[in-house]
């Protein structure tokens, strides 16, 4: 293993993490809801949630999209936007993300951040599982198949 | 009040994802690529996020309700099961294929719509597909 010290951004990563943690804390202490993005999005798509429960979810997602865009404009762009990525990887992967997060009741935020922060055994098992399959998948795609960017 | 809290939390979450550079799938894949030039940054995103929210969850155990008066929606399941593991495994594969988990997928919508739009649409299809399947499993 070689570590890419040149692209290592510890302070940005920590500050971004703290902002995410503040967001999860605000949503939990403010209104008693877990900041799990797949859960929030999924209950909007499923058409089952009561109408009073839909407004805050839309506002959270709109805020998320706007928050990222505002910082993008303020900083003039911290990274180069990716283009030319194989569409079958993007769409096929997104289908699996949709199925997997509903089947497993959560994603990086719900299990990885909130689950671990409240010492949930389910959160820990889920996080170890999706980290594991993500590492293996990237290895297969980049180093065995030679797709998807730098090797 | 509830809606204002949600909007504020969403803004913070999106800003955090962007500052952490998780809206950049190349950055995420560099973290997931242990055999390449490994970029450990995202581990520190998790450390920061977990440390802060752990305080929030600990504080809430001493509160009757949340500040808006709404009850805390503690997750009801506590034991891992096969559905959790299978779902997390599929999610990880999809994350590794794309470089986006759901939060960054939304965060990238206004920044890189050419990728975020097909990603979010396909993710929504996957979610609805599973929900339909689960409903069918319960009734049939």
Image (cartoon, coloured by chain):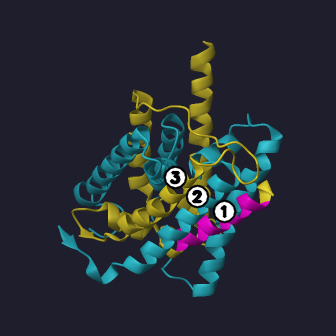
Q: Position of residue A56 (x, y in %)?
A: 75, 52
Is residue B122 at least partly visible in the picture?
no
Residue range in magenta is B4-18
Q: Quadrant of the N terminus of chain A?
A: bottom left
- Foreground mark, 2 or 1, reads 2
- Foreground mark, 3 or 2, reads 3
Label 3 and label 2: CA atoms lie apart by 13 Å
* Res B58 label: 3
Q: Are marks 3 and 2 on the same chain?
A: no
Q: Is B13 a magenta residue?
A: yes
- Asked which secondary structure carries label 2, the reply is helix
Relative side of A117 to A61, left or right: left
Quadrant in the picture for residue A67: bottom right
Q: Quadrant of the C terminus of chain A?
A: bottom left
Specify few, some or many for label 3: CA neighbours under 10 Å numbering under 14, 14-19, or 20 or more. few
Specify few, some or many for label 2: CA neighbours under 10 Å numbering under 14, 14-19, or 20 or more. many
Q: Which chain is yellow?
A: B
Identify which residue is drawn at 27% across, 80% down: A5
Identify which residue is drawn at 61% across, 42% down: B125
Q: Position of residue B103 (x, y in %)?
A: 56, 58
Name the residue tied to disc 1.
B10
Identify which residue is drawn at 48% across, 75% down: A15
Name the residue tied to disc 2.
A24
Label 1 and label 3: CA atoms lie apart by 22 Å
Q: Are marks 1 and 3 on the same chain?
A: yes
Magenta segment main secondary structure: helix
Q: Which chain is cyan?
A: A
Q: Position of residue B59 (x, y in %)?
A: 56, 54
Q: Position of residue A79 (x, y in %)?
A: 48, 80
- Asked which secondary structure carries label 1, the reply is helix
Looking at the image, the residue that sits furthest to the front is B62
Mark 3 and mark 2 in contact? Answer it, CB < 8 Å.
no
């Amino acid at each position: 293993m070689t570590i890419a010290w040149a692209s290592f951004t510890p302070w940005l990563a920590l500050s971004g993490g703290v902002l995410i943690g503040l967001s999860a804390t605000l949503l939990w202490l403010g209104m008693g809801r877990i900041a799990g993005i797949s859960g929030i999005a999924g209950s909007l798509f499923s058409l089952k949630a009561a109408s009073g429960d839909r407004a805050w979810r839309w506002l959270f997602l709109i805020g998320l999209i706007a928050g990222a865009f505002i910082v993008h404009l303020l900083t003039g762009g911290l990274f180069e936007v990716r283009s030319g990525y194989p569409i079958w990887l993007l769409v096929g992967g997104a289908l699996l993300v949709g199925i997997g997060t509903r089947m497993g009741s959560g994603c990086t935020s719900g299990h990885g951040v909130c689950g671990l922060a409240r010492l949930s055994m389910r959160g820990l098992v889920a996080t170890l599982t999706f980290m594991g399959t993500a590492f293996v998948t990237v290895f297969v795609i980049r180093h065995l198949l030679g797709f998807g960017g730098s090797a | 009040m509830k809606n204002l809290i949600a909007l504020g939390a969403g803004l913070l979450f999106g800003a955090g994802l962007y500052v952490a550079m998780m809206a950049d799938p190349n950055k995420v894949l560099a973290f997931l690529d242990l055999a390449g030039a490994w970029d450990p940054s995202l581990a520190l995103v998790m450390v920061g996020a977990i440390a802060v929210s752990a305080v929030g969850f600990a504080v809430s155990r001493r509160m009757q309700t949340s500040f808006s008066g709404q009850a805390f929606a503690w997750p009801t399941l506590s034991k891992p099961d096969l559905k959790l593991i299978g779902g997390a495994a599929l999610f990880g594969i999809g994350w590794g294929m794309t470089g986006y988990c759901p939060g960054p997928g939304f965060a990238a919508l206004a920044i890189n719509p050419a990728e975020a739009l097909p990603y979010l649409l396909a993710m929504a299809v996957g979610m609805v597909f599973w929900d339909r399947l689960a409903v069918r499993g319960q009734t049939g």
